[in-house]
Image: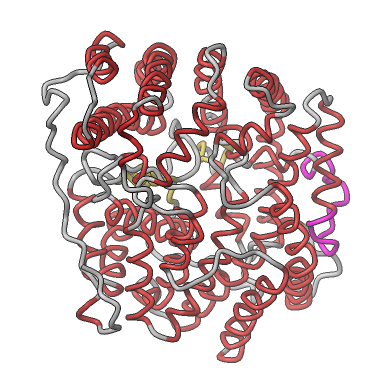
Amino acid sequence: MIKNKSTVEEVSHPEPLVKSKRTFVSVNLEIESWESVRAYFEDLHSRKIQAIEELEKWLRDRSELFSVLEEDLAWRYIRMNCDTSDNNLAERYIEFVSKIEPEISRYSNLLDNKFQNTPVKEKLDPVKYKVFVRALAKRMEIFREENIQLISELQVEEQEYGKISSEMSVSHKGKEITLQEAANFIKDPGRDTREKYYRKVNERRHKDAARMQDLLSNLIKKRQQVAKNAGFSNFRDYKWADLGRFDYTVKDVQQFHESIRTEICPLAEKILEKRKEKLSLDALRPWDLDVDYDLMPPLKPFKEVDEFVSKTIQSFRKINPGYGNNIARMNDGGFLDLESRIGKAPGGFNYPLYESNIPFIYMNATGNLRDLETMFHEGGHAIHSFLSSKQDLIEYKELPAEVAELASMSMELISMDQWHIFFDSKTDLLRAKRSQLEGVIQVLPWIASVDKFQHWLYTNPDHSIEERNHAWLEVINEFGSKIVDWSGLDQYLSLMWQKQLHIFEVPFYYIEYGMAQLGAIAMWKQYKENPEKALINYERALSLGYSVPIPEIYNAAGISFDFSVGYVQELIGFVADELAKLEGVE
């Protein structure tokens, strides 16, 4: 149990969890078709519920069934991404989302209606079930039978982005390397090398630009139809309801865009001005943005994946022994796939497995600093998965991004105290920390750009490709740098949005990173002041899963769910001060 007193001994050490014991679904179930699971849904739908104990048992059984189904789908998704060249893996995923999931959706709505029409539900604890009840009511409100097939088709088509991206490679010394590997050369001290590989990567992306445009056009068309079917004028407003954004409005997000433009963008520009000055450049070009501004070689926190894993576990154990033990358990059980390779989909994620109570971390590591940041980011998600796994309903384990990203982004910053494990040189350690803090500042304008662009895409769904590119240029002109010289590179700038997976696969899931980044800064500030108390608050918040509204989870962490101008000023000022301290050490 997490107590309120701030002593090291009272920071919990999460023990390795065991797979949930099934009491409703057969342990021998193999999901090969809808018929494999139909009987369980029919049981739930026909079951008589006359007492509160029967209703709570019904809810637990429903949760168990969905946990089993979600985990089966999770493994299909994971395996498909690990090897996009294996058509059998893709077919198994497609089989689920195109033939099984539509039926699940239909029966899920029937079960939602059964719950709503059960008089005994009024006896449920209104506090414990508040989040569950409001989410269920919203699901029922936007459910439409005619959307089942459309959503199924979208789930399949969205995966085309990963397939297209996984096929991209460039030549290097006579062999093909992934774009992630090529990106390491854009950090090279030699400017000619940086430019060469920058152009290689972007030319390769440009070759598939038309495919990406067509893919997005098709996705927008179908998403807009889903919205219209559900009674919304546009997909943005539909998605707002679908994502369960109960705790803030579209206007709040638009205000957040403005806070980033006025408070963050000027600071990001100062960082770039300093970069241009340190590099003694007449013009700061896009291939000058990732190189160390003292022209030192790219940071190499590890050489091999085994070393990466070992040092990661060691670092997590320094923060909290239980955290490290859980990452070690994931490694021992085959729940990590970290290296980059051709045929593997891009990106990184932590995928919770609701029945096994252990998550899976996936990424494309090539030995650079970004890999380190990603690992602690996804590791934060993993710790969150472990901590929230004791929630008794799957709905409370399925975390909203505003909360999930708080866990991951906080861990990126908290972990910096252990980065010496990866860097023997004090100079390299300072460079790594400086890069991380500069990244905290510079990522916020990009987040605002991607989010505002999506608002435009879906409130103007009938736009042409030319209008789409123009809209992106207007957005990036608002939030992007005036210092970076893009002359002669307009074709790359206008398509820069295509590198953002979220636009294709998880629309509107991105602004949450900005909200959570502010929360993470507040969490890190608390950690700097009192590490033991901060971890107690961190665990208290994460253990809640999504059993209470988002502001209450942030309050449990000892921070505020706030993205007003004043709060943004306060937090980003703290980051700027910490960055100045690092530069003072240099």
- Is 101 covered by the magenta stretch? no
Say above or below: 196 vs 522. Answer: above
Furthest toward the bottom, the residue is 584
Please state, as top left, top right, bottom left or bottom right, where the N terminus lies in the image.
Answer: bottom left
Q: Relative to 281, does residue 245 appear above or below in the rendering?
A: above
| Residue range (magenta) | 478-493
Residue at x 57%, y 54% (from the top left corner): 513
Q: Quadrant of residue 438?
A: bottom right
Residue 272's quadrant in the figure?
bottom right
* Residue 53 visible (yes or no): yes
Residue 211 visible (yes or no) = no
Label count reads 0
What residue do we see at 30% from left, 53% from top?
A: 388
Residue at (52%, 31%) from the top-left corner?
162
User: What kind of secondary structure does the magenta stretch mostly adopt?
Assistant: loop
| Residue 24 x, y percent position in the rendering | 15, 27
Residue 91 in the image, given as x and y percentages of width and height? 39, 15
